[in-house]
Amino acid sequence: MSAVLPVLSTRLSAAALAAFGTSYDPELRSSTKPEFGHYQSNLALRIGNALGQSPRDVAARLVASLQVEDLCQTPEIAGPGFINLTLLPETLAKAVNEPESFTSRGQRVVVDYSQPNVAKQMHVGHLRSTVIGDALCNVLEFAGYDVIRQNHVGDWGTQYGMMIEQLLEEGLAAESLDLEGLQQLYERSRKHFDADGTFADKSRLRVVALQSGDPGTRAMWRHMVDVSLDDFDKVYALLGSNLERTDVVGESAYNDDLPRVVAELEQQDLLTESDGAMCAFLPGFLGRDGDPLPVIVRKSDGGFGYSATDLAAVRHRVSTLHADRIVYVVDHRQALHFDMIFTLAGTAGWLPATVPAEHVSFGTVLGPNGKPFKTREGGTVKLVDLLESAVSRADALLAGREGVDRAATARAVGIGAVKYADLSSDRGNDYVFDLDRMVAMTGNTGPYLQYAHARLTRLLAKAGTTGELTELKDPAEQRLALLLTGFGATVEQVAETLQPHRLCTYLYDVASALSVFYEQCPVLSSEGATRASRIALCTATRKVLQDGLGLLGIEAPDAM
Ligand code: ARG
């Protein structure tokens, strides 16, 4: 067994079927207050409403048919007709001892995330996508999905024609440039392109050469891509991201599919020419002025853009990668883009209704002034600099601690603090990048949870023995144990809603219940079966914290 909640839900639905001849979802939930027992259902209120009967009478009939005496104390009816269930201590102990495990669902999820752009530094937006994407992939895998990570790197388009042309004009060797150099080259080429029509024309021809595979042009482009990918890998390593080189399937990867995408849309009469560009106009998509909004699949200069690539990517993910679900972790400003891409891909038959495509949208990282996070000069803040400052802030906190591997722990705590701050608020919200708050040891922060884990580790090392969970007498023990049994359901919920903050809230609740438990229930100084049980409860709590932080992509050091 282990997951008690689904078992009780099934029993309650069976009771409703027996008493009222209809199946209902009992919507059994964790109780909001300890005096309402462990779980609570409003089923009697709903049935009572539907049948025009008194909810308390309905509740009495439900309880009369409900068979849970092997798992619960006698069910109670409260207030207007709520049914409250309280587990027997041995049921609770068993549920903690045998945590739920997930088996393969035979379902594949493709997750598009991180997606930095070649020749540019990664910025805080890419931090969010990377951190949220990693956490979601971990959760989905743990929940039994087969996950394919796709790093849709921005490595294609007009700007590379411009940059290569600028490189040639300046007589520079591509090999001489690092990422910083590439970014400056981009800025020079942009200015040149805007000011000089001849240069602009040459750049456009260069794009054609790139897209049609001219070897010299491709070699220079390849170098720019490689330099950038090396740099991204450094950030991924510092972040502890799971992304690997083999997950990079950049925009360029779809180049050869683009003409076919356009041809198929044309065959289906989905394209209209507008100012020389090939566009799809979808019903219901209107701009502010009320004019129909286009999805531009081929630009007037013949080049393909961001939308064409995304259409090819959807097609590839469904037909070649056999996705059962596709997830895009991209900031909220691209909501309309994805809405239109999914609609068009659906219309064209590339995205069947059975394959949900979800835009996992997230808000903006703000600076201390409440505006989007920028350097004082208005430039993008380099992600590496930001992460390194978090690590040194954490390092300062660890000063004087004994038995701590300082460098490794500072990295775990600093990076963990940044990740946790990003994951713990509803991803749709903006948040202020505030290192002081992120590394705080109290409140709903990464270091607070890491500390709870490290303290348990120390306590268990001192205990020396392992114990068996046989008794749960104290309410603080019961509350903690009950929370621990909810780990699987929380993972399931995150896999469904793609909202990692639900896991953070859950872990914070566990850590808070743990500190109440510490206050009320001595562990090392207690004796016999009580001591053994409490040690077992600590072991189970430590595992939940460790697994939970692991799913969030956060390290759990043994000492800090
Ligand atoms: N590279 C883009 C950016 O930095 C994000 C790409 C998102 N993924 C996609 N399939 N379009 O804004």
Image (cartoon, helix red, strand yellow):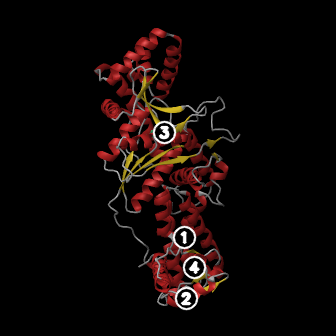
Determine which residue is flagged by label 4.
Answer: 51
- Marks 4/1: CA distance? 52 Å
Crowd rating for badge 3 (residues with CA inside 10 Å; few <14, some 14–19, many 20+) = few
Label of residue 61 in the image: 2
Question: Of circles 2 and 1, which is in front?
Answer: 2
Sequence-earlier tag: 1 or 3:
3
Crowd rating for badge 4 (residues with CA inside 10 Å; few <14, some 14–19, many 20+) = few
Callout 4 amino acid: Leu
- Marks 2/3: CA distance? 52 Å
Callout 1 amino acid: Leu
- Marks 2/1: CA distance? 46 Å
Q: Please state the horizontal and vertical placement of residue 150, each as a whole percent of the image.
A: 39, 44
**Of 81 and 439, which appears nearest the observer?**
81
- Per the image, label 3 sits on a secondary structure element best described as strand
For this orientation, the residue located farthest to the front is 52
Label of residue 456 in the image: 1
Callout 2 amino acid: Arg
Crowd rating for badge 2 (residues with CA inside 10 Å; few <14, some 14–19, many 20+) = some
- Tell me which corner region of the image, top left, top right, bottom left or bottom right, holds residue 389: top right
For this orientation, the residue located farthest to the right is 369
Sequence-earlier tag: 3 or 4:
4
Sequence-earlier tag: 4 or 2:
4
**Of 427 and 9, which appears nearest the observer?**
9
Label of residue 283 in the image: 3
| x 61%, y 84%: residue | 474
Sequence-earlier tag: 2 or 3:
2
Vertical side of 229 occupied by 452: above or below: below
